[in-house]
Image (cartoon, rainbow, N blue to C red):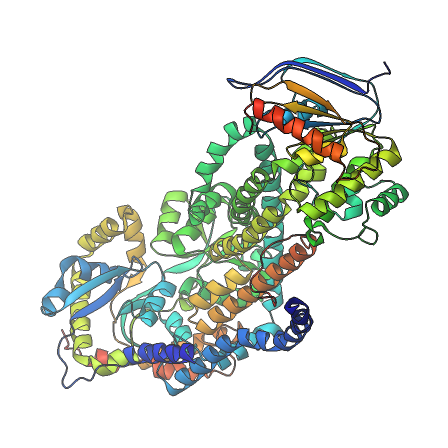
Amino acid sequence: MSEALLDIRVERKNFGATTVLTNVHLALQPREAVSLLGPSGCGKSTLLRIVAGLEKDYQGELLQGGGEVAFVFQEPRLMPWLTVEQNIGFSDDDGYDKAWVAQLIDEVGLTGFGQALPKALSGGMAQRVAIARGLYSRPQVLLLDEPFSAVDAFTRMKLQDLLLQLAEHHGIALLLVTHDVDEALYLSDRVLVMDNRPSSIRQELAVELVHPRDRRDPLLARLKALALTELQRAHVI
Amino acid sequence: MSSKSETLPVALAPTLTVQRSAWPRRLKGLALPVLILVILEVVVRIGWLPSYQMPAPSEIAVTLTDLAEGALWKHISASLLRVLLGFTIGAGLALVFAAWVGLSREAEAYLEPTFAGLRSIPSLAWVPLLLLWLGIDETSKIVLIAIGAFFPVYLNGVAAIRDIDRKLVEVGQMYGFSRTRLVRRILLPAALPGLFTGLRSGLSLAWMFLVAAELIAATKGLGYLLSDGRETSRPDIVLAAIIVLALLGKISDGLLAALEKRCLAWRDTFNGQGPEN
Amino acid sequence: MKPFFNTLLGACALAFSLQPPAHAAETDPAQVNLDYAYYSPVSLVLKHFGWLEEALPQTKVGWVLSQGSNRSLEYLNSGGVDFASSASLSAVLSRANGSPIKSVYVYSRAEWTALVVRKDSTFNSVSDLKGKKIAATKGTDPYLFTLRSLQKAGLSKDDVELVHLQHPDGRTALEKGDVDAWAGLDPHMAASEIQAGSRLLYRNKDFNSYGVVSVTDKYAKEHPQTIAKVLGAYEKARNWAVKHPDEFAKLLADESGLPLDVAKLQLSRTDLSSPLLTAQDVVSSKAAAPILVSEELVRRGVNVDQVIDQLIDPSFGQALPRP
């Protein structure tokens, strides 16, 4: 087994009296794309936040194999007073790497918008900036928390393709939280299905398709049926 | 497709209306004051209003010109200096305290009740106290003005910091920003809109407290000029002083507003009826 | 257009409310307001004994405390009082600046002001005050006294720092050390001398102006009988004061809240013997008036002599019955 990029084990995570996560274990390999699929409130976002270091109060262990970890939130969360360029290079204050930022802007398809302010961007464009910001620190792992849930279906598909492109190009592993079954299957190598609180990982679906994938591929449809069956059994749907 | 044919005129219309309405808009603002001045002039000249109680606007204009040739600039500079000093001190302290209380629950627990109590002291009630403790010199005046400027800036500052979107702060936390870095890079810029509101409010209060300070035991300044006119039965001087005060207040607020506009150009907010409506 | 009409209507309403109601013959007014002051001891007598209320049984009599000539004249101009007690030179200043008032009676001729310094001060003459702080109530006799004294010593008001404080506050400022000198006014001046040991740096009887009771032009035209009755009551009070000096002093002390010796000191400098305005008074006012022009207290181009002629009206005093 190759060196895992990160290994997270959560025995128990409570919010007050409610137990949200129980006995969760996942390991992420380099260049791997893993989705956490489950209903709202099942703790998948919490798990992601634990991995990101935003939640520290849990029983368990997080092992990180070195390398940067970056986070993309559900909302773009851009600093409204900074330009697109400055937002992307945010972690480096004023001395951000201009050439690298310019390249990232091109890669996410926002050429020419470097000097724009967030108020001038559409939702989809803002999320592209957020992704670029995530990529700025040259991470090995990109954590994404329902990153495309706030945009329309067509933009979502475009952004999913963009994400795959970038992950491929920069050799980044993805850990993605989503409630969209199609998205999980389209993007990931493995889909981890979670159930209601207190949740753990009920099922792991392997998606053995090469990229680029065809959304119309019948294998995806079959896997979707499996996932839906499992979700039904878990009384999620 | 109907949407296509609509886009063209809609794209043209905004530019046309902006050019046409900029001029009349300014005139509209002037219409009311000019009307009032004309009516006053007529009413006083006819004699319906006695001129020893309400001088005609033309008379006030003459007084202003006379003053402008003489001591007016001395009074203006004295008042301006006091306002600037008092405002800077008051607003500066307020920003420091607002940051402290806004960022630290402990500090809030200790300091907020005291400030809330002090805030409810009516402005003019400070005057006799300060005169007693600090005398009739510049110190008591500047302290009074500083007190006036302090509270709006402090209140708005705390509210602005508390209002900051937690989601933005989390971005900084995720990057592992230190406390100072969080303040500098996220909290301060995000709180700026509220801070500016506080600063403008504080400035207008500083002017108000200036007049209160100068009405008592001053030897120069616009408030002194005001009381001067009062004591020597010169309502024209009273009104002239009021006009100059209003002008200076408006100009200083205008400067702050312009600064605010520049610093906050990034804001994505509702600002009245736009041409799209 | 609607806002225009509303403004016009409002202005008309305001203007009409200021029109005088027509009078057929003079009846006693429903209300008359007078001021009283510690610098006008006779007013205190009048208020105390209620002789005015007796003389005007149909009228409600209101009394307003005045802290100085500047206040009295302000109340007169705004309609707060019908009869104002002020220094004569202050009345001249007021009239010269456009207030339509007439002086009708002299309530006292006193040496009531001087330049006061602390008991330990090293100043010896007025010229020592160059560049120093002097507390003086703008628009009152002490203020004008100061200007005249400065002029005599070759200084102008810009050579010193004149701090505008009402009379009692000026005393406090002097005694606390906030100012170097104070243009004092009795009884506060007398109190400062006796209680704090302050000394009078510069006295000049001629630079004191006499105290007058003034009314507005309009009032003089419309209520001559009322004025006569008020002055008659004033005379009654004055005669009592002249005949009962000890009780007078005690009354002044009680009313002003100051000790008896302070009251006595003030009254020792007060002359109540000639309440009528004479040609001599006109002359002395005219002699004092130039200071108003030279210190730019009046508007440019005002003929102060003419103002004094219009201001001083001896007719009311002459119409009084002789005792």
- Measuring from the top left, give residue B172's x and y in whole percent: 71, 33
Q: Horizontally, is B18 left or right of B110 in the view?
A: right
Q: Which residue is the extreme one toward the right?
A: A99
Total marks placed: 0
User: Residue A72, can we see it?
Assistant: no
Q: Is residue B68 above or below residue A79?
A: below
Q: Is residue A167 above or below residue C244?
A: above
Front-most of residues A150 and C54: A150
- Measuring from the top left, give residue B244's x and y in whole percent: 55, 67
Residue occupying the point 39% across, 83% down: B43
Q: Is residue C19 above or below residue B191?
A: below
- Measuring from the top left, give residue B84's x and y in whole percent: 62, 53
Residue occupying the point 67% across, 12% down: A60
Q: Is residue C274 above or below residue C127?
A: below
Q: Horizontally, is C245 left or right of A102 in the view?
A: left
Front-most of residues A26 and B113: A26
Q: Horizontally, is C311 left or right of A62 in the view?
A: left
Q: Quadrant of residue A134?
A: top right
Residue occupying the point 51% across, 71% down: B240
- Measuring from the top left, give residue C173's x and y in whole percent: 46, 48
User: Residue B129, can we see it?
Assistant: yes
Identify the image quadrant of the C terminus of chain A: top right
Q: Horizontally, is A62 left or right of B268 in the view?
A: right
Front-most of residues B220 and C244: B220
Residue occupying the point 38% across, 65% down: C70
Identify the image quadrant of the N terminus of chain A: top right
